[in-house]
Image (cartoon, helix red, strand yellow):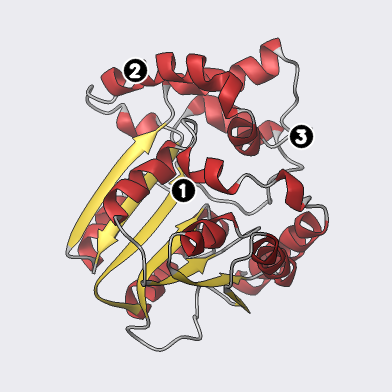
Amino acid sequence: MSDRILDSERRFHDRWAAAIDLDGLRVQDYFEACTAPENRFILHHLGDVSGQRLLDLGCGAGENSVYFAQRGANCVATDLSPGMVQVACQLAERHGISIEGHVANALALDFPDNSFDIVYAANLLHHIPDPRLALSEMHRVLVPGGKACFWEPLRHNPVINVYRRMATEVRTEDETPLDIRFVQFVRSRFTTTHYDTFWLATLWIFLHFYLIEHVHPNDERYWKKIIREHERLTPLYRRLERADRLLKRLPGLRRLAWNLAVVAIK
């Protein structure tokens, strides 16, 4: 089962990599746009990354590695997909940045213990057959006091689950969004854990894409669209974000958010 899932994920992301336009990748916006609250949360808890050895686990097209390398980190970009690793290295070259690129399986990393100051993973764990094993590998390769940073979709919101059932062509068949209780496992492995959830009322933007702008989820990846078009979405997002801050104070509502972001210290 595990090998079948990994092979399927590799093929899917190799096909995606072959279609990526480097000119369309918004490196800074991916971390600093108002519609990137997960990465803004992570940046707040990371602080200065200059001189830090950083493992970008599941690097995708490389926006993460390039962003952190631009800020002085020594980045190792890894992905199960050779195509994605190639794109990440091309993006780094386009930006005049040097990174290392390696094909790697997050369930069995080919790095010694205590190799990295930071491990960063964006939208990776829900693609993996055993996210707990992947987190344990992240913990293993971190130095004492190192930080594991990741953000992932949650499974609890009925609206986003409808979206998932519609977006069959831009998602892999074996994706398994996390349960909010995954945070408890993180806390059991790390000395300190910071987390937050994002996108409650702000999910109206997804409904707006579909109901008002008539953009089908299979025609455009909404999670990319919110970054690419963040300038025009800013006024609407800011209003809805204020509502999110209020909603998350109510018992049980944080788990209904779309995404979870975590920074954990070994």
Q: Position of residue 246 (x, y in %)?
A: 27, 18
Name the residue beneath numbered marker 3. 218
Q: Position of residue 143 (x, y in %)?
A: 28, 78
Name above or below for residue 189 compared with residue 104: above
- Label 3 Cα crowd, 10 Å radius (few <14 / some 14-19 / many 20+): some
Q: Quadrant of residue 226?
A: top right
- Mark 1 vs 3, N-terminal side: 1
3D distance between C-alphas at marks 2 and 1: 22 Å
Outermost residue on the bottom side: it is 112
3D distance between C-alphas at marks 1 and 3: 20 Å
Q: Position of residue 240 (x, y in %)?
A: 42, 16
Classify mark 3: helix, strand or loop.
Answer: loop
Q: Is residue 122 visible?
A: yes
3D distance between C-alphas at marks 2 and 3: 29 Å
Q: Quadrant of residue 239?
A: top left
Q: Mark 1 is on which residue type?
A: Glu
| Residue sitting at x 51%, y 67% | 57
Q: Mark 3 is on which residue type?
A: Asn
Q: Position of residue 102 (x, y in %)?
A: 61, 78
Q: Where the C terminus falls, by quadrant?
A: bottom left
Name above or below for residue 92 compared with residue 126: below
Task: Using the image as rendered, state which of residue 242 and residue 162 is in the foreground.
Answer: 242
Name the residue beneath numbered marker 2. 242
Name the residue beneath numbered marker 1. 152
Classify mark 2: helix, strand or loop.
Answer: helix
